[in-house]
Amino acid sequence: MKPAMIVHGGAGPWPDAEDSARGQALVDALHTGWRILEAGGTALEAVEKATNILEDFPLFDAGIGSFLNQMGEVEMDALIVDGAALDFGAVAGVKHVRYPISLARRIMTDTPHCFLAGSGADLLARQLGFPVMSNLFFVTEAEFHRFHEKQHAAPRPQGTGTVGAVALDTRGNLAAATSTGGVPDKMPGRVGDSPVFGAGGYADNRYGAASATGVGENILRVLLSKYAVDAIAGGMNARAAAAASIDHINSRFQDSQAGLIVVDRDGQVGAAHSTLKISIAWMDADGQPRVSMQGGVGVR
Ligand code: ASP
């Protein structure tokens, strides 16, 4: 079976001048995942390693570059879903983990639990031998300045740079990954959709896989990623399912501010958004990387 992969770097407005750097980081992540898939590796491995690249890229709101909360701290959330076993691992509110998506995977595979939050998750990371970083490690200079200037500035737009990846491997396994620093100026302890199974991500080998981005408080209320996979179960391809999911969230919320990427079990990819932009990269039918900041992803 031919593999398929699509990644995203969030939905929302951001300066056009950043498009090319964001696009290049997405292509790097896509290549990382694609090499794994082409070598016969699993979809799970591909989405994790692709997400690690995006977690390290400072223009995205995940890992390094995460938004600061109202107390000036980074709190990160992540979810990984294994569509073969209908299994997932998730973390919320971690402050010291270099790669939250990798910790989420180890929670799924190495513990009896699915979801760990806060200090317990950070502690597990240390016990598993993950690099433990000071919270400042994740704070970029730009975010530091934004935090200190925000008292005098107009409110900033919602988060723009959560990252995610969905893939189909050569054995027909589907996986999804989503990692985020949440929304800017969030209350300490706030958790959005990203680490919530069915909201920020979902995968089921029988149908498809999805990763969402945008205003978590809206996405949570419609379980956007599960909605997309249900639409595939109902007979849609990835592209139609992505569009139907955005239609659905728009029908419930006036300004839904959401986006998502989808892969179906036939290896078609899709994306849709109700934000100004969504940054995505995917492999086309010829195995060539394609990038878009406006959705516009067709059938492979
Ligand atoms: N969905 C993320 C959250 O609400 C933010 C984003 O995707 O921009 O935490």
Image (cartoon, helix red, strand yellow):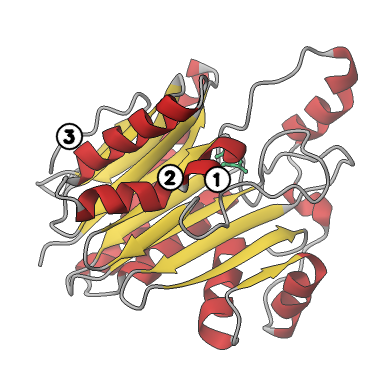
* Residue linked to disc 1: 220
Residue 166 in view here:
yes
Frontmost residue, 201 versus 147: 201
List x then y, in percent, for residue 282.
27, 44
- The N terminus lies in which quarter of the figure? bottom left
Q: Where is residue 109 in the image (x, y as percent from the top left)?
A: 51, 83
Q: Which of marks 3 and 2 is in front?
A: 2
Foreground of the two, 4 or 245: 245
In which quadrant of the rendered view does residue 167 lie?
A: bottom left
Q: Taking 13 as reference, is 174 left or right? A: left
> Quadrant location of residue 131?
bottom right
**Amino acid type, label 1:** Leu
Query: Hey, what amino acid is under mark 2?
Result: Leu
Q: Name the residue under label 3.
A: 298
Element assignment for label 3: loop
Q: Distance between the residues labelled 3 and 2?
A: 20 Å
Q: Which amino acid does label 3 sit on?
A: Gly
Q: Position of residue 134 (x, y in %)?
A: 83, 59
Image: 74 above or below 258? below
In the image: residue 26, left or right of residue 55: left
Closer to viewer: mark 1 or mark 3: 1
